[in-house]
Amino acid sequence: MKFYSFWALNAPLSAERLVAQADQLAAAGFDGAVLQPRFYMPPPEYLSPEWIAALREFCRARPDFDLLIQDENGWPAPSVDGRLLESHPDLRQSWVARYPTGSAPEGAEELCRDGEYVYVREWGSYADTLNLEVADRFIELTYEPYCALDDFRGRPFLGFFCDEPQFGPLDHTGRFGGGTPLGALAWTDDLPALWSQRAGGDLLPLLPALFFDLPESAATRVRFYELTADLFRERFVGPLITWCRDHGFVWTGHFKGEEHPYFQLWFCGPLAPLFRAMGHVGLDMLERSPGERYILRQAATLRRQGLGPGMIECTGGSGWGLTPQRLYAYLWWLGLHGLDTLVLHQAQYQLTPQAIHDWPPSLPFHQPWAACLPALFARLREELGVSRLRRRFMKCWSSSLTAA
């Protein structure tokens, strides 16, 4: 079992400061970190040669410290700190929305009409992850600069953490479908052509069946959600994973809307095919107490089927009042579901006023009980070890036979 820090980089990057804080993280029992540019403030500029040089210096100084780097300044990927759409505005996300006839926003592209409603295409402020070119541009702008760390590939630089990529119709404010009052569905330029190739027929006349309960709605919705999920996996997630594997890097992270099958339909599609493409499980559960079990049981099921390691971003939003006892109980609960790489959200590089309110606590840098962490992690490793669980199971099994 490994414990990583979700290390929030929110002030000017300094190799010396990174090394000093990595020493603190290691002393607290962490095996490594996910370095997350988070409201990052230059200098140096994000992804600049100076940025890469500072990371090279850090890798050289701490070759024994596992390092994953989040592939975005903030979240969700793939904004590239806003640069992707600045250089390629034609790659903006779009969606189809339903309006009463005559009330659609000016400039929206009409796709079809159905009685009192009109179905139009609108554009948002996020990248279109159903468009194959987005993955190519994201790799070019974000991943390729890190090839300058190739001589540290595998140790300490493991690869990339992708935070909350999705295809659902969200605008920059986080409003679903830009706040459209009657619903919205993900769209991309060649979706009608792909529908014709894969499902047969014309998609546009079927749009009402996606919004209303009609006789053809069930079959239409199944085909539509399967198609958008397949495109997200084939055109965005797949190329990133392939590029990373070809270059000897790990690709991990978690997806927007993973919590429940209903949300998965809108934002990322079913998780099992995504996890199988990744070769492991990657989740996000930001609480401090056991709660939602569905996603964990899905992860545990896939682990038992032989899928690789299970990583989870956890404990964010636990509050400054988080205690060692509560942290132990929560991490133990996660570990019981087969998640063996726990990424504790988060260690603040600098405790700015923003950082004080930014999903605390800051572990271990700004917690008075941080000295407890090595013992806490050691106990979790022992309690959750395979041999210990096997002994405990055999003891219970033997007891039940004796009782019988």
Image: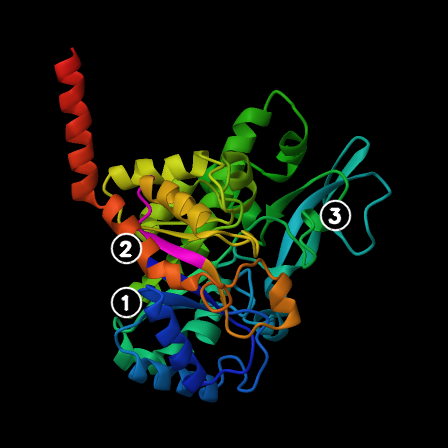
Q: Which residue is mark 1?
A: 246
Q: Residue at x 54, y 83 (%)?
A: 12
State the residue in front, 129 or 110: 129
Which stretch is magenta?
337-344
Along the polypeptide, which appears first: circle 3 or circle 1? 3
Q: Is residue 60 left or right of residue 163?
A: left
Residue nearest the observer in this picture, 124 or 200: 124
Could you say whether the residue bearing mark 1 is in a helix, strand or loop? helix
Q: Is residue 67 visible?
A: no
Distance in Å between CA atoms under marks 1 and 2: 35 Å
Q: Between disc 3 and disc 2, whose residue precedes?
A: 3
1 vs 2, front mark: 2
Asked if marks 3 and 2 touch (Cβ < 8 Å), the reply is no
219 with respect to 235 (left or right): right
Q: Is 338 colored magenta in this rendering?
A: yes
The answer to whether residue 51 is left or right of residue 299 is right
Gap between marks 3 and 2, in whole Å?
48 Å
